[in-house]
Amino acid sequence: MALALLAVAACAPKPLLARAIAARGGPLPGFVRESEARVARGFPGTWRWRQVYLVPDRYAWTIYTAGEPDHYLFDGTTARAFVGGAPVSATPGATSPLRTHARFVAVVNLDALALPGVALAPLAPGDLSPGAARGLDIVFADDGARYRLAFDARDLLVAATGPLALPPFGSGTVTARFADFVPRGRFRLPARTTWTLGDTLLAEERVLAACPDPAGLDPGAFAAPTALPDCPPGGAAR
């Protein structure tokens, strides 16, 4: 009887989260990504930025400007802003809009969803976004934040919806839709993302370079912008 139960368990389908992580190429503890975006709201135009992420919630966003770049770093506790290498501000993470960005990226990256304090439930067919084959409802125990993820028939993540703070525009429910999945080392990652706030287009992002799991990325890199790794054109996984 015990052997029969083990055989049934071995043949049972994997949970959707595990299948989605496998479909994109496996666990992805961190990444560096350089992007160009056509921004439609606030300050319309073409922007360049870099995002750096490390499980579970370390995050950095660098916006390239005509002068020195603006850096926003979240080390899991404190959010810091820099202009070039000069510190500008430091605020508790619990009250910083940047924490919502870190959380959204963590949700999209999937790996942190397997950690304690995250409740996952399958979405009902009627709650799926158009074109999605299946989905997940995500709720975080620490603040009750809720997200919805949509996956296609290949179990690739094609859309994510959840709360995001966007000063000076306030906070709202943002949806990111992912497309053009391309190989990045052993991973298959989206090259294009469309960002909307409700029915309003925010930006259309195109990835210029992506470096999954870059060498040397550790929690200490999120203390200052000089410690953040770059991602050269054509960058790929180790």
Image (cartoon, grey):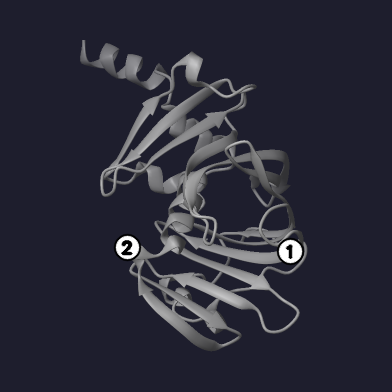
- The answer to which of marks 1 and 2 sits earlier in the sequence is 1
Q: Amino acid at mark 1?
A: Trp
Relative image position of residue 116 (x, y in whole percent): 27, 45
Instruction: Indicate whether 15 appears above or below 169.
Output: above
Residue 51 quadrant: bottom right
Q: Which residue is at 40% across, 79% downward? A: 90
Q: Which residue is at 50% across, 31% downward? A: 19
Q: Which residue is at 61% across, 71% downward? A: 62
> Which residue lies under the disc numbered 2?
94
- Of all residues, the one furthest to the left in this rendering is 1
Helix, strand or loop at label 1? It is strand
Q: Nearer the viewer, residue 33 or 79?
A: 79
Left or right of 109, for residue 138: left
Q: Amino acid at mark 2?
A: Ala
Residue 156 quadrant: top right
Assign the N terminus to one quadrant of the image. top left
Gap between marks 1 and 2 measured at Cα: 28 Å
Relative image position of residue 7 (x, y in whole percent): 34, 16
Residue 189 in sight: no
Q: Residues within 10 Å of mark 1 (few under 14, many from 20)?
A: some
- Of all residues, the one furthest to the bottom in this rendering is 86
Instruction: Indicate whether 22 appears above or below 231.
Output: above
